[in-house]
Every structure is written in structure tokens, then in C-alpha cells.
Image (cartoon, grey):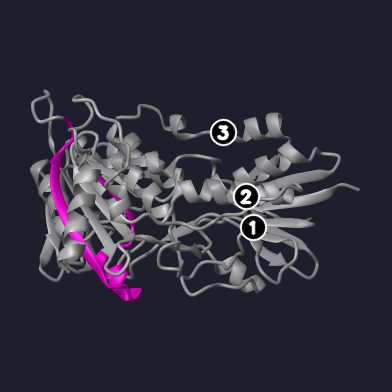
């Protein structure tokens, strides 16, 4: 009799695992059933702001593979609108509720992939009775927001609560739709994934496109009129709003796992080994935004919810389930985004991360241009490097600048991944031509400045 693989969660990690397992084992050897509580599989949540803004015309352009494709090309039984409500490890069964048809189904498993992702942090003041307040974690969330924005009377004033990636990107998307936008952040800066000096550059760009930024402000409630949101209440007074977008971050979706007795780590994510197996629980794997993983620089377990990691982790799990061998080596937290035309990139540790991890370090900022200064279109770029004082090893990097800025973080990520020192980086053989870089690339200029700082110390 064929073995059965049950996948809980039908987005990046879950379907990557299912697809990889299928590539190595046919149906006569392995049946695959994937449960997804939403209406979509394998979509780009990162693309949601660009559909909301109208830059991406159609919602379905964000869907990489739909359920019909998984059924036809991979022989995977995808069951949409089915929410797994229990996992019985002793009986090797899952219990799922049919959200549309009602009723309950039970399915046995030999192998289980837990890939439930992350859930948005919900503030206490988010009153469900007040309509017009939206998260944007899933494509279903985004569809509801888009319907609200397209309805009459069209919203004119938006408040975005939270200044992380999704908050910043959604603020820009709403500006592009013609709304007046206020972004509220309880911390002292938006974009907390970079250091305050670099975040200040991002905040300036946001104000430059008309976003009203309120930092150090706590939201305490909502005001409504006729069941619709009319204002966000803060300690500094009310902010008028016809629509509210929540961007307060996410946490691993582990409630089902914890109820089943799966181990959860210090970061809040499910503990897994390098092959994405849940330790001590034979036949159970986990991947994606619900797990914790090793940070290769700090050596600490972290929760870094990114689609890049989810796809790789799901692939690793699927290869192993399929009889191959693969490992996931950890993360360094590389990420990029943009605000209007300003690009932001980061990798590795911030200053506060390096200090918390016990490193003694130097940090430098270098100003340069994306192209030769005389070439048309040359724009400024700021590169920040953090290096270990004793060894000169790169610990982290951040870039804020205009055209061609953000993807330069990949050069720094490769150097960081491979444990290079800033001294070694000064000799990197990087491409040069006036349309693409000055003769000394901004990465090299920053590395030289870091070397100088180390010698001065």
C-alpha cells in the first residue's frame, strides 16, 4: 500500500515540499493530500502591495501555481477551504473542517509536513464590529481590502498602523491610489529592520511622497460611525480614517502544533533540525514561517518569516521525504524593499543585534553613487557596514539609495555568508562600467572605510 503524505498549509513551504516529494516518488508509492484553509495556493504575499496599488493589474498574477495545476501536473490532492483542527500523533491522523461544505474529515498519514506559516499580530483595540480594518497577510485579506477601496463611497483617508516592511509598502500603495496616508509607529522609527540612522533616510523619502509619519505614538482604539471606521484613537489624539491597514508584524502559527505536542523554540517557532525534521517526532516535518532556524552570524535561533526561506525549507523537506538528502543551513536575514524609488537592503546583524550577541564591533557609513558621477542618472547611495573589531569579519550591512542600490546587498550577503573580512572585501573583483558603477563600487568604498576604522581602533 502506498504511503500517505499530509501537508498542512498550501502556500510556499507546504507546496514546495509536496512538489519535491512528488518529483521523487510517484502515486503508487506516495499519496499526497494538501489541506489549505484559504482559497489560494502558492501565491506571492510579497506582491500584495503592488496589486493594491494597481501596479500589478490582476490578482491572479500573484498566483504561481493554482490547485488545478498541482492536481494535473503533480497528482497532489489539494483541498481548499479545509482547516486542519487537530493532529493526532499517536493515531497518525489529522482532523480537518470543511469551511464551505461543513462537516469533518479524518485522514491518516505516514509523513506530515506542518507548514501553517505565520499569523498577523492582532492588537487588543481592533474591534471586529468596526468595518474597514484590514490585515494583509493572505491573498484573501488583500481581496477584502481591495473591495473596500474600490467600493463607493471611495475611502479618502488611510491610517497604516505599524512601520515594518508591510506597513511601509502598504502606505506607498495607498498613496499611489490617491489616499491621504498617515503611518503610526509605536517605536521611534519606521523600518526597524535597519539601524536608526539608516531608517531616518527611509522616513525622509516617505515624507517626500506625502506620507504623514507619527513615531512614538501608541494606538489605543478605534472610532466608528454606522459600523464603519472613522478614526484611529491614539494617545496623542484621533487620526481620521476611512480605512485602516494593520502592519504590526507576524508570529509563527503554532497553536495546532503545540496542541499536538510538537516542540516550540525560544523564538516562538517550531524546532526543526537541518533536514527540517521535527526532533523526537518521527515522520513529522515543518517548514516556512512557522519554524525557527539558525542565524549563521549570531548562532542564535531566530524567526525570520520570508518567502525565500519558506520555499527553500519546503524544498529541503520534500527532497528528504522523497528519499533524497538535503539540509537547510540557516539564514542571515537578507531582505530588500523600496519606498517610491528609494531602495532599502539589509543583511546580517544590526548594531543592536551585534551588541546583544556579545560582539565588539565597529560600524561605518559610506556615501557614494550608483554610477560614475559624470554618467547621466547618477544618484546617491549610503552603505553601512558592521564588522567585528578583533577579526574584521563582516557582521552586517545595510544599504539605502536610489537606482541599483538594493540588489548590491546581495554582494554583501555572499561575503557575510562566507565569513569574509572587510579587508578581504576591499579586493573583490566587482564589475565596473560607468553606467553601472563608479570605478570604486560603493561596496568597496564602504569596505575600505571599515578597514580604516578597525586600524584606528
Q: Which mark is residue 65?
A: 3
Q: Which residue is rendered at x = 72% and y = 37% of the image?
A: 23
Location of residue 138 with respect to 70 vertically, above or below: below
Q: Viewer-proximal residue, 350 or 433?
A: 433
Per the rendering, the mark at residue 316 is 2
Name the secondary structure under disc 2: helix
- Residue 226 in sight: no
Whole-percent x, y for residue 18 in the image: 67, 44
Marks 1, 3: nearer the viewer: 1
Crowding at mark 1 (Cα within 10 Å: few <14, some 14-19, many 20+): many
Specify the quadrant that holds the C terminus: bottom left
In the displayed structure image, the side of residue 427 where residue 202 appears, left or right: left
Q: Cα distance, mark 2 to mark 1? A: 6 Å
Residue 275 is covered by the magenta coloring: no
Q: Is residue 361 magenta?
A: yes
Give the CA separation, mark 3 to mark 2. 19 Å
Residue identified by numbered label 1 = 275
Contact check, label 1 and label 3, Cβ < 8 Å: no
Identify the secondary structure beneath mark 3. Answer: loop
Region of the chain picked out in magenta, as a range: 344-371
Q: Residue 92 at x, y = what percent?
A: 78, 63
Would you say residue 391 is visible in this rendering? yes
191 displayed left or right of 318 = left
Q: Is residue 176 left or right of residue 288?
A: left
* Measured Cα–Cα span from mark 1 to mark 3: 25 Å
Amino acid at each position: 500500500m502506498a504511503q500517505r503524505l499530509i501537508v498542512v498549509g498550501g502556500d510556499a513551504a507546504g507546496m514546495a515540499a509536496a512538489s519535491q516529494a512528488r518529483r521523487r516518488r510517484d502515486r503508487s508509492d506516495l499519496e499526497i493530500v494538501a489541506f489549505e484553509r484559504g482559497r489560494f495556493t502558492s501565491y506571492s504575499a510579497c506582491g500584495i502591495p503592488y496589486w493594491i496599488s494597481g501596479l500589478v493589474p490582476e490578482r491572479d498574477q500573484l498566483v504561481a501555481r493554482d490547485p488545478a495545476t498541482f492536481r494535473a501536473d503533480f497528482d497532489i490532492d489539494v483541498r481548499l477551504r479545509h482547516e486542519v483542527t487537530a493532529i493526532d500523533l499517536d493515531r497518525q491522523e489529522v482532523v480537518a473542517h470543511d469551511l464551505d461544505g461543513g462537516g469533518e474529515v479524518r485522514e491518516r498519514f505516514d509523513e506530515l509536513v506542518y507548514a501553517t506559516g505565520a499569523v498577523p499580530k492582532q492588537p487588543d483595540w481592533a474591534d471586529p464590529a468596526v468595518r474597514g480594518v484590514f490585515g494583509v497577510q493572505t491573498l484573501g485579506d488583500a481581496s477584502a481590502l481591495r473591495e473596500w477601496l474600490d467600493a463607493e463611497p471611495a475611502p479618502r483617508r488611510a491610517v497604516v498602523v505599524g512601520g515594518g516592511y508591510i506597513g511601509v509598502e502598504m502606505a506607498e500603495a495607498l498613496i499611489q491610489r490617491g489616499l491621504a496616508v498617515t503611518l503610526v509607529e509605536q517605536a521611534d522609527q519606521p523600518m526597524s529592520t535597519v539601524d536608526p540612522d539608516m531608517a531616518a533616510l527611509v522616513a525622509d523619502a516617505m515624507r517626500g511622497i506625502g506620507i504623514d509619519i507619527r513615531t512614538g505614538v501608541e494606538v489605543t482604539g478605534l472610532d466608528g460611525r454606522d459600523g464603519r471606521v472613522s478614526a484611529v484613537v491614539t494617545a496623542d489624539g484621533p487620526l481620521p480614517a476611512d480605512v485602516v491597514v494593520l502592519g504590526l508584524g507576524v508570529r509563527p502559527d503554532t497553536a495546532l502544533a503545540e496542541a499536538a505536542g510538537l516542540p516550540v523554540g525560544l523564538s516562538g517557532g517550531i524546532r526543526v533540525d537541518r533536514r527540517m525534521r521535527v526532533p523526537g517526532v518521527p515522520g513529522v516535518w515543518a517548514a516556512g514561517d512557522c519554524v525557527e532556524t539558525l542565524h549563521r552570524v549570531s548562532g542564535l535561533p531566530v524567526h525570520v518569516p520570508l518567502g525565500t526561506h519558506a520555499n527553500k525549507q519546503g524544498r529541503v523537506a520534500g527532497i528528504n521525504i522523497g528519499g533524497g538528502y538535503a539540509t537547510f543551513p540557516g539564514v542571515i536575514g537578507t531582505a530588500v524593499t523600496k519606498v517610491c524609488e528609494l531602495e532599502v537592503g539589509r543583511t546580517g546583524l544590526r548594531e543592536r543585534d551585534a551588541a546583544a550577541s556579545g560582539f565588539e564591533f565597529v560600524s561605518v557609513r559610506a556615501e557614494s553613487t550608483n554610477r560614475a558621477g559624470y554618467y547621466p542618472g547618477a544618484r546617491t547611495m549610503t552603505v553601512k557596514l558592521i564588522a567585528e573589531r578583533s577579526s574584521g569579519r563582516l557582521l552586517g550591512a545595510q544599504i539605502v539609495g536610489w537606482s541599483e542600490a538594493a540588489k548590491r546587498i546581495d554582494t554583501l550577503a555572499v561575503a557575510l555568508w562566507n565569513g569574509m573580512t572587510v579587508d578581504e572585501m576591499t579586493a573583490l573583483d566587482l564589475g565596473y562600467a560607468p553606467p553601472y558603477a563608479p570605478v570604486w563600487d560603493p561596496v568597496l568604498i564602504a569596505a575600505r572605510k571599515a578597514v580604516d576604522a578597525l586600524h584606528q581602533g
